[in-house]
Amino acid sequence: MPLLEVIKEKCKGCGLCVKACPFGAIEIVNKLAVVKESCTGCGACLDSCKFHALYLREVEKQPKVDVSEYQGVWVFIEHEGPQIAHVSLELLGKGRELADKLSTYLSAMLLGDEISPLVEQLFRFGPDRVHCIEDPILKHYRTGPYVTAASLLVRKYRPELVLAGATTTGRDFASALATELETGLTADCTELDIDPERGLLVQTRPAFGGNIMATILCPHRRPQMATVRPKVMQMPKPVDTKGGEVIRETFDLNEDQILTKIINFIPSTETVNLADAQIIVSGGRGLGAADNFRLIEDLADVLGAAVGASRAAVDAGWISYPHQVGQTGRTVRPRVYFACGISGAIQHQAGMKTSEVIVAINKDPDAPIFDIATYGIVGDLFEIVPLLTQQFKRRLRK
Ligand SMILES: Cc1cc2nc3c(=O)[nH]c(=O)nc-3n(C[C@H](O)[C@H](O)[C@H](O)COP(=O)(O)OP(=O)(O)OC[C@H]3O[C@@H](n4cnc5c(N)ncnc54)[C@H](O)[C@@H]3O)c2cc1C
Ligand code: SF4
Ligand code: SF4
């Protein structure tokens, strides 16, 4: 049942609340406001009703936890065999900063089978401790066993923060773990910090289609949980280390108790690797047609770059989705990002604005992409991109 209720006797059917709801969750039926199931209970519509016909039902209050019992910043380590996901290392870098601000320890939460070789690698990226469970059942990621193992560790050691990568695995893991622990989770954060007064995790992420940045706190439940997409946080430099504390636990689960079975692994056929590319050349609606992506590919070829795209170009069917950069595409942080015929909408910027150098080519001098560009070229991409390709070809002697 929706959290918002309409007092029918007071409602005049004026429709002001319909305009006020950012989720489109109210409609007028027979001159009465009707609240749909999609109502989130955000309360944004309450003040819009001049007739006091709207109210929010009281949500059953969760008992508060004693937050003082929780300490430590934990990072969930995603890995496939011996390969640790870059995003987990990036989060160890951010985790170190947060742990220092909280004057607490940083731990890597490592689950899997034959994981001992990973422990040494992890210590090079700054954790004080590695909390691990090693078991053949954890060889490959599966929601059930991973969440059982992680909740066992979290319940025993009570970390105040748990961070995970906003990857396919990390999103699945973090949401299931937060549900199991009955705590809050902020997905796809773009910034994380500590509130100096209350010591809370300040989680920033785009909201309402990326038009505003929301700051989210989780004051009453523990741990505070957040996911962050790859490349949003900076990769820390590995250091020589003497190691740290390894805390091993075991858990008791056998294959018969697990609902999902792994039958086979089929490697992804996706060949676009935007996340690791040092240089990306991206095209947008300014290209005008699918065939014109040839210009982008030519420049990318000469530079050994990957090809990216705006959502407009993807939606037009000019290039496939794995190339999309932005809020609903990939987040990238290359050394050089070329934006060709891309206006630089906030949702596109969300995926590329931390690139080291941004080169923007656009015929509109007022395009927002120029606000964040390191080098801006105002002009027709059909002239400029081939000239750049020609010059790079000559100078790189290709
Ligand atoms: C919830 C949500 C999520 C979204 N997620 C994403 C996302 O992940 N990624 C993303 O990119 N967008 C995303 N968008 C869409 C975003 O708002 C923009 O609509 C989109 O980025 C625009 O793409 P564009 O810059 O290619 O097109 P436009 O905004 O149309 O810009 C085209 C640009 O090309 C220039 N141009 C035209 N002809 C030439 C020429 N001959 N030479 C040089 N310049 C030329 C124009 O001046 C213009 O600036 C999202 C939107 C929403 C609501
Ligand atoms: S603003 Fe108030 S009176 Fe107007 S339709 Fe909504 S609930 Fe009814
Ligand atoms: S409470 Fe929020 S989501 Fe629900 S109808 Fe009002 S504005 Fe919309």
Image (tube, grey):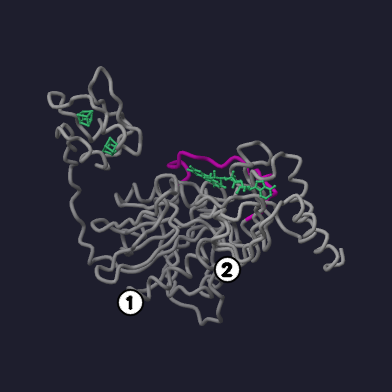
* Screen quadrant of the C terminus: bottom right
Q: Which residues are magenta?
A: 254-274
Question: Residue at horizontal 54%, vertical 58%?
Answer: 230
Q: Is residue 49 above or below residue 294?
A: above
Mark-to-mark CA distance, 1 and 2: 29 Å
SS type, badge 1: loop
Question: Residue at horizontal 20%, vertical 61%?
Answer: 66
Q: Nearer the viewer, mark 1 or mark 2?
A: 1
- Magenta span: chief secondary structure: loop
Q: Is mark 1 within 8 Å of ligand 1?
A: no
Q: Which residue is mark 2?
A: 117
Q: Is residue 217 above or below residue 68?
A: above
- Say whether residue 269 is magenta: yes
Q: Is the residue under label 2 in contact with that under label 1 (CB below 8 Å)?
A: no
In the picture provided, is 173 more to the left or to the right than 180?
Answer: right
| Quarter location, residue 4 | top left
Question: Residue at horizontal 34%, vertical 69%?
Answer: 72
Where residue 345 appears, x then y in whole percent?
A: 53, 50
**Numbered label attached to residue 103:** 1
Where residue 77 appears, x then y in whole percent?
A: 49, 61
In the picture provided, is 281 more to the left or to the right than 232?
Answer: right
In the picture provided, is 102 more to the left or to the right than 31?
Answer: right
